[in-house]
Image (cartoon, grey):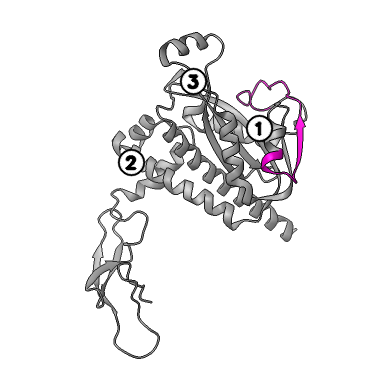
Amino acid sequence: MHPSCPHCSSRNDSTSGPRKILRDGYFRRRSDGRVIQRFHCRSCERGFSHATLSLCYRQKKRTMNHRVEKAYIEGCSLRGIARTLGLSRTTVVRKFVFLGVNAERELEEMNQNLPKVAQVQFDEQETAESTKLKPLSILMVAEKHSHRILGFEISEIPASGRNAEKSLKKYGRRLDRRAAGRRKLFSQLKSFIEERAVIESDDHPHYPSEITSAFPQATHRTHKARPARDHGFDELKKGKDPLFSINHVLAKQRARMSRLARKSWCISKRKERLRLHLAIFAVNHNRARARLEKHVESKRGSG
């Protein structure tokens, strides 16, 4: 079947008549050795191929994309990936940005194609940008039972404790933008969450009013904060945790994202790169949860 022309949208009609799209030979792609069909458009007199509309069009070392993505979500650092795969750091960074941009798009498509969510949990975790004197807050929203990540938002927050005075002296006053970040994310996810959904969180004093404003018909349930377990990067809680779904997601992020690990050599130098890394993690996490649910359903059907 001949594709339509990406330049002028011409295509071959099913009726008899002169063809607008003609085969125009083949070429062997250097990056992976695959044979690609060429085409010629008689309407605009331009050529194209099966690879023209690919997201990896004209990309070198495209076979490394999947390996770089898997390494990033398994706790490897940028320099570690470059050493392991024999790539330059520049190549790894370029592929990371490419994967992150595509992951943001895919996460949006996941939310649009799947049914609206009836039970939601959300929570925040802290990290930093280039130094502990510039902390950040990550708001994560996930479906309760499937653990599917719906979205996230990164917000600047002021330093606290011993770092507060140093941060103020070196970087000036930092505003707490968490409330604005929560409002922004809730507004973006409004079309993916049912109007009468059950939304769960901890007992933060600002959450009830913000949930009521964004989801007036939803039921908001708060749970008292619990002490952390010895394992789980302080994200998993002792006893029967009513917020286990979101805490489990946050613990996996700490474990599988090098820049979020506690007492690590790695740190985010730019907030935008942290966003891309979170998008890559979210998409791969959702894919894994979907495969697991499909496997469980198939086991139940065969049983």
Residue picked out by circle 2: 94
Q: Which residues are magenta?
A: 212-236
Q: Quick one: label 3 or label 1, which is nearer the N terminus?
A: 3
Mark nearer the viewer, 2 or 3? 3
Where, quadrant-wise, is the C terminus in this rendering?
bottom right
Q: Mark 1, residues whose alpha carbon is within 10 Å: few (<14), some, or many (≥20)?
A: many
Q: Main secondary structure of the magenta part?
A: loop
**Is 80 on the left or on the right of 134, as rendered?**
left
**Residue, disc 3:** 174
Q: Position of residue 287 (x, y in %)?
A: 56, 49
Q: Which residue is mark 1?
A: 247
Vertically, is 233 above or below 170?
below
> Dividing the picture into quarters, in which one does residue 67 lie?
top left
Who's the residue at 49% across and 20% down the image?
Answer: 174
Asked whether, in this view, residue 136 is left or right of residue 60, the answer is right
In this view, the residue farthest toward the bottom is 16
Between circles 3 and 1, the one closer to the viewer is 3
Q: CA distance from mark 2 to mark 3?
A: 31 Å
Q: Quadrant of the N terminus?
A: bottom left
Q: Judge the density around disc 3: few (<14), some (14-19), many (≥20) Cα neighbours within 10 Å.
A: some
Question: What is the C-alpha distance between the residues marked 2 and 1?
Answer: 31 Å
Q: Disc 1 residue type?
A: Asn
Q: Which tag, 2 or 1, sits closer to the chain's start? A: 2
Vertical order, 179 against 101 (above or below)? above
Contact? badges 2 and 1 (CB < 8 Å): no
Give SS at disc 1. helix
Q: Does 223 lie within the magenta span? A: yes
